[in-house]
Image (cartoon, helix red, strand yellow):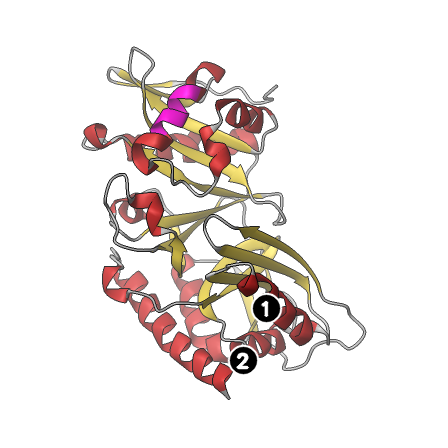
Amino acid sequence: MMKINVPAQELGEYQVRLMRDADAPGVVALYRAIYGEHYPIKEMYDADYIIKQQEAEMMYRVIVADAAGNILGHSGLYRLQGAYTGLYEGGQGMVRAEARSKGFNNAIYSYIMQILLPAVGVEEIWGESVTNHVFMQKTAISIGTKETGIELELMPGESYEAEKSASGRVSAVVACACVKEKPHTVFLPAPYADILKKIYVHAKRDRQLKTAAGVLPQKVKTSYFDAFIADAGVLRVFVHEAGADAGETMAGLVKKYLDAGAVVLQVFLPLNQPGSGALTEILNRLGFFFAAVAPRWFDADGLLMQKLVNPANYDEIRLYSDFAKEMLQFIIEDRNRAEALALI
């Protein structure tokens, strides 16, 4: 059973609390109300699964319920398989359409930040605010997160058919929150030195910035974790260490997963390793471009790079902050640069 014990908070006639077993069917109903049958992680429609997920401390769910126990809103705090154990993602936030003017988003996220995080022992939060509207972006900024990049075309358009809130795939602004800082050295790949410096200043992180090297160690074998979410068409690769075989390894993964139907390919590479510059160049030549800084992804920071199979509809991306708009412009330009390199 769950090891943590956190109090509920009253919000007028509503209650904000950690999900109880009896709430699980209502949480499933909430997913259906928002996403129909098209949420890309199908286990979220299984009440027993989400109960076991919370018991195993892999995902905590904070809900807002009315006096009758109806679940009106929800957000999750969960571990990311293959990433640093002190890093949790905050996400899957949703509120029923008829309850969206009641401030539930802010109440849920405040509960997570002030009550749940200290109880769980989280060191860093990774969040993704969708861009088919700006509400989640505004909430994320209001609770103190810092924007560090944009993931293009992350969510499949089918997920938004129930509410007709998007006409195609949906991008996401990366918003991170430091709970426990870990000062360390990061090596900046040359094409991204300026944007990375801006992001680190914006995020107010304690880092020593150095120039990345253009070579990879000869005697190191590239090691990585890969996960493919087939229903979303999204591949994620976490490169724990890169050696001289990195080019062949990455090219092999790209071919394998393009053949499997991936349309969004993401690679997280460690910025605390001097060879990050050489690995960035390899990925650029495979058509990967800048996406985001991923603080504490490997305990040390990561750089997220992305490759898209299809054109992106940039006009559909709704951004709240000027900083996010500046990052998007850089990302569009970098995509053009990287895709031109890949044709050479």
Nearest the viewer among 142 and 189 is 189
- Mark 1 lies on a secondary structure that is helix
Q: From the viewer's perspective, is residue 8 above or below residue 253? A: above
Q: What residue is rendered at 30% in x and 53% in y? A: 131
Residue farthest top in this picture: 68
At x 24%, y 15%, the residue is: 13
Residue in the picture at 30% in, 63% down: 323
Res 83 visible: yes
Query: Which amino acid type is shown beneath numbered disc 2?
Result: Arg
In this rendering, the count of numbered labels is: 2
Residue where numbered disc 1 is placed: 255
Dividing the picture into quadrants, the one containing residue 207 is bottom right
**Residue 140 visible at all:** no
Q: Position of residue 275 (x, y in %)?
A: 65, 74
* Vertical arrangement, residue 22 with respect to residue 141, above or below: above
Specify start and end residues of the magenta stretch as a single range.
25-30
Of residues 47 and 282, the one nearer the viewer is 47
Residue 88: x and y in percent read 53, 42
Amino acid type indicated by mark 1: Lys
Q: Main secondary structure of the magenta part?
A: helix
How far apart are the alpha carbons under marks 2 and 1?
14 Å
Q: Which residue is mark 2?
A: 285
Residue 147's place in the image compared with 312, above or below, is above
